[in-house]
Amino acid sequence: MSEKTGKMPTGWCLVSFSETCEPVSDEGLKIPQKSYLKHGRYPIVDQGECCIGGYTEDAGKLFRGKLPVIVFGDHTRRFKYIDFPFAVGADGVKLIAPDDCWNAKCLWLFFQALKFEDRGYSRHFQFVRDALLPLPPLREQECIREKVEEILSDLDAGVAALERVQAKLKHFRAAVLKAAVEGALTAEWRTKHPDIEPASALLTRILAERRRRWEKAQLQKFKEAGKEPPKNWKAKYPEPVEPDTTNLPPLPKGCCWASLDQLAEIVGGVTKGQKFTPKDETRVVPYLRVANVQRGYLDLSHMKEIRALVSDIESLRLQPGDVLFNEGGDRDKLGRGWIWEGQIPDCIHQNHVFRARLFLREVKPKLISWCGNSYGQRWFMRTGKQSVNLASINMTVLRSFPVPLAPAAEQEEIVELVEDQLSVIDHLEADIETKLKSAQALRQSILRHAFTGQLVPQNPKDEPAAELLKRIAAQRAEIARQAQAGKEGARRAEKARRVKIKPSPKKIRH
């Protein structure tokens, strides 16, 4: 349909999904994700980003229908053109068989031009089935396909180049953080400042502050309970976890390894779905979820609220400088986090987000978070709990997380140098992201022009789509008539055969 006039191009007609497409059953063919193989004989097509999600050796699960088909991800809203034997992924996969009036690849391109309402991880196949499809003449469909593929091949090459640069910037970011936490970034600075206080002295002060705060908290508990501190109560002080340096690299002179438990007070957050009694004093406050805590930044665009005990709100209220770590779930979420800077008053955090509050301000929160977001992800994968698709860390793992502690003055220099380099990377990444979004908008514009008749000229000699539909319908009717006639002929032949072999009645003797 023309965007300017609202009319269909010459020879085109508007059809419904059910008129020209058919959902194909995959009953009994689906393969659960836990059964995917990294390598195998038969590819598995699911709704993920890649065309092939895994492999299987089970030939009995292969799709036996007519190829090509279009695979739709009911949650991801991705369409895939499949013209090779394949097995079906288990979750959210829908198969669409194009009618003979369609060039299958042309229909696949049209589906990519559909605009979906963003409903998150939801079901969208009904939207596809309700869509009206602009059907061009069959020869024009082939022209559209050729032209779109020609244009998109150049666009895809440009996008691939941008994505390669994007990946290199990601590696460069990791290299900067690695150099920062290992001391390579400030090697020259250290030679110019040989007499600074070593990190071991800083760690001694931190541990003293850690014990002081524990003793103060214990005395407060005794006071609130109306009790005198028992004899030798200080001996019950829980010593912090020591870092395991067995497989850790050596650090520059003046630096030392410390556990997160030595440097910070670590707590979990509030649990959703708590039950309260009428006597409980509660309030509704904003809280951080795993989705809010990204790797290297906080996404506060969609905040939620939770009802919690006032006492929990007081103890869990976030303060500027708190370092946040995600418990995990998906692998990309494991240990990721950033710094709370007091953006929202009275904000707390849920139990899947851990909070580390440093004992001394001489330790820079950004350095701790950079450690967690760089080598920490691999460290958490080795030490955390892992299953087929999920990974998680608990409080014990987080407390033992090793942190390279630099002298306080050197930490100031590290933060300044890292932020200078990361600001350049951030600028380049933002520029690439803008270009990628522009490329996606251009792709949609190309597809929109293709399926409003503006990309290739209409040929009046082409068989109109309406006539094509009539011809296909007539062919199907004739095939159905012949099939019915064949069935009738077979029934008449069977009836004649039975009459011919019918036994004669026996003579009755008198």
Image (spheres, rainbow, N blue to C red):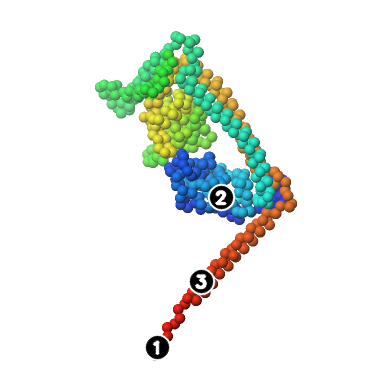
Residue 427 shows which numbered tag?
Answer: none
| Residue 222: quarter of image | top left
Q: Which residue is mark 1?
A: 509
Q: Is residue 489 positioned above or below 186 on the image?
A: below
Which of label 1 and label 2 is nearer to you? 1
Residue 494 shows which numbered tag?
Answer: 3
Q: Earlier in the sequence, mark 1 or mark 2?
A: 2
The alpha-carbon separation of the residues under discs 3 and 1 comes to 34 Å
Residue closest to the far bottom: 510
Which of label 3 and label 2 is nearer to you? 3
Q: Nearer the viewer, residue 146 or 431?
A: 146
Q: Earlier in the sequence, mark 3 or mark 2?
A: 2
> Residue 321: in sight, yes or no?
no
Which amino acid type corresponds to the residue marked 1 in the rendered image? Arg
Say whether residue 507 is left or right of residue 446. Answer: left
Q: Earlier in the sequence, mark 3 or mark 1?
A: 3
Residue 243 image offset from top left, x and y in percent: 37, 23
Which amino acid type corresponds to the residue marked 3 in the rendered image? Glu
Residue 320 image offset from top left, x and y in percent: 47, 25
| Residue visible at 45% across and 78% down in the picture | 503
| Residue visible at 49% across and 34% down in the picture | 292
Badge 1 marks a residue whose secondary structure is: loop
The alpha-carbon separation of the residues under discs 1 and 2 comes to 69 Å
| Residue visible at 60% across and 50% down in the picture | 131
Which amino acid type corresponds to the residue marked 2 in the rendered image? Leu
Residue 67 shows which numbered tag?
Answer: 2
